[in-house]
Image (spheres, rainbow, N blue to C red):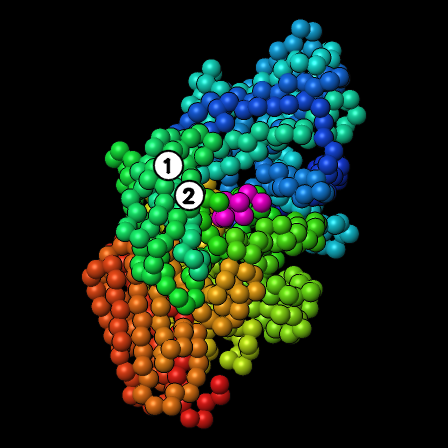
Amino acid sequence: MRKVLRRVLKAAAGLAGTAAGVLIFGIMDFLYDPEFFRSGRKPAPTTDSAPGEAEVEPAMLRAGSGYAEVTLKFRCGPGGISEDGGLKISLCRMVDFGNNGRRPAFLYAHGWGLIQNRHPRLPNYYRCELRTSGGARLEVASQGYFPLRGALRFLGREFLRRCGVRLEALDVGYLYLEQRKIRIRVREGRLREGDEILVLLGDRSGGSRGWKVPARSSRVNLAVEVDERASGLYRFIERNPVLEAVGGEAEALQPVLSSPDREGRGRIHLRAVDARGDVDPAFEGAVRLLPPPGMETAPEVIFSPRDRGVVTVPYRLAGPGVYRLRASAGGLRGESNPVSFGGGMRLFWGDLHVHTCLCDGNLEPREFYRSARDEEGLDFAAITMHDTMEMFEPSGREEEWRLLRELREEFNRPGEFVVLLGYEWSDHRYGHRGVYFAPWERDPRLYGWLSPESDDPTKLRECLRVHHALVVPHHTSWRRVFVLPFNWAKMVRLRIPPAYAWWGADDEQQRLVEIYSMHGASESYDGPYPVTHGNPRGWFPRFLRDDRVPAGYGNYYQEALAAGLRLGVVAGSDRHDYAVDERVHPVDIYPRGLTAVWAEELTDEEIWRALWNRRVYGTTGARMVMELYADGLPMGSEYYPLGPVSLEGRVLGTAPLRRVELVRGRKGVFDVAWSSCGGREAGFRLTDGDEGERLYYLRAEQEDGHWAWSSPIWLLGEGEQG
């Protein structure tokens, strides 16, 4: 026993000594070269640009297609490049700040892997070539898969900062981005205008398999910076080429019908998609449209290369009814979502939970809004930047918030597309929640949990009291911390309170809950889409796949309703657009959710009022039509019935309905008051003669696995406050 103990103590001492040695090395290396961290600050947007132009070939590859060779060609502009000048090349996204210029953004998981130029036989190897009539040569900095020395320096610097040494916090993402740049210097002469530098990414001449193509769709800039005067000042060229990993070959057609206006006019967003539902931008050819009786539209549409897999055409309806359109092209088929026309409110679709490269997502903000409007056929959307990014990128947050406000003004167009302003308050101890500001709010502010004035839900509530705002809790049943990639850190049971910190029932700003997103659903513990973060490759304990909190802590939607909270239902994507295999990076494993809104018109004020009045429901992405009324009042209503209640509802599916249920909640107990199965449509009319407070909401499951949940209707009993 003593021998075992000695060995354990020796091993522990050895590990401690190794860690201390590494830390001391990092501290000394930092003190030796503190200028190393000059690039650890986020650059300001700039309109300045350097001479030269670049192109990438091929510019488009199929996601998941294995390994490839990609060539970046830079051509020197007027004046060429002086001796000792050079280039820096990075994989990032260039964020468009409008009149203020552009700025690179670090991407957390773009999927293109770690490039290196030390080992010609290993994957992701690159080399550089020079085409010049002069005698200059290139000097390319050595680069491995990971900047280990830089990481040690960073650890040493952070240790000193935590010990009280006055060192400003770094923008860690930008520091890493700087370290991962390809660095090229011009030696022994200068380059003339027209000379070319080629970067062969995934070069196979030395035996490498090539450059690993992302598993999912991805879009990055190969951003080129030029120091043409050897002054040490690098500037981006005006047009930085875009490299894309795109969806596979089209296997289906996806017609998306917008809500018809009062005159029956709408749009068809026709998409050619692969097996995963990603658009195939290379799709070409004629597609035949097969409208039902009463719908007028073009009989045929032609896809060209510039359409990039999406074509929009108008339609018009002749009279009231339910309409579904079919499309075909060779062996490709597709049927649209149903639309209902004929009086009453209109149905609009949107996504209010989106992350872009302003935080930990991959999409450029303008790119997202254009895609949501023109490709996905959404009616409204909101980019919700994480407040936690201040931990990793403390500088530049105000200008990013200002950019989101400017984008709202730019893309918000009544009758066409609505943009709401919001952000995500992301303290996992108390539970994440989205904060959205009304269109007429004059002073929307980002109150983050890292700020002492709003670092817990009670303080946040006090800050928002003076604002016109909605607060939407989301993934309320997720209470286990995880660290990516691989999610192995869940083995460490970090101390997080199991209960979600709801606000009280008397708080009007907490009127909705996001019941579903890519993380899973939170209706009930035994409900569909349990919150999880994947099934990574190799051995992985079963208990680590389940990230749900047990029932009984009040986290689930039904538990919140039973506690007296009156919460309408929305759903969102919580999309980040990570481009890596979900088995390695276990996020984005469920479909992207959508919010459906019943509103009078497509304006920001009407969408906001519908959200406030809870005339909303959520789905796992399928555009099912869902209606629920009590005595003629729509979902989200609460009132005192004067006698027996007339309940009425309808569900129009995008696939056969496995089950549709009218759920009744009374005294904390939930049961099914009515159910149906089969077919694509289901409806009911029934009378409720009970007394006392109770609520009803609809839920539906389709044969294809998609779900939808409506906001409830509350029937108040005697003595209840309306």
Give the side of residue 380 with respect to residue 710, left or right: right
Counting from the top left corner in percent of width and height, residue 294 is at 31, 53
Q: Secondary structure at mark 1?
A: strand
Counting from the top left corner in percent of width and height, residue 305 is at 44, 29
Residue located at (41% from left, 36% from top)? 309
Which residues make up the magenta segment? Answer: 366-373
Task: Report the disc number at residue 313.
Answer: 2
Q: Label 1: which residue? A: 301
Residue located at (31% from left, 78% from top)? 647
Q: Farthest residue to the right: give it.
A: 231
Counting from the top left corner in percent of width and height, residue 86 is at 70, 22
Contact flag, marks 2 and 1 (Cβ < 8 Å): yes
Q: Farthest residue to the left: give it.
A: 678
The N terminus sits in image quarter: bottom left
Magenta run includes residue 201: no
Q: What number of labels is visible?
A: 2
Label 2 packing within 10 angstroms: few (<14), some (14-19), many (20+): some
Q: Image quadrant of residue 443?
A: bottom right
Q: Kindly report the distance in space between the C-alpha atoms of the residues bearing marks 2 and 1.
A: 8 Å
| First-in-chain label (2 vs 1) | 1
Q: Nearer the viewer, residue 305 or 239?
A: 305
Vertical comparison of 95 with 139: above or below = below
Residue located at (29% from left, 73% from top)? 662
Q: Nearer the viewer, residue 173 or 31?
A: 173
Give the side of residue 583 with respect to residue 138, left or right: left
Vertical comparison of 720 with 174: above or below = below
Vertical comparison of 528 with 250: above or below = below
Q: Main secondary structure of the magenta part?
A: helix
Query: Does the image show residue 18?
Result: no
Q: Amino acid at mark 1?
A: Val
Q: Image quadrant of residue 100?
A: top right
Residue located at (22% from left, 68% from top)? 676
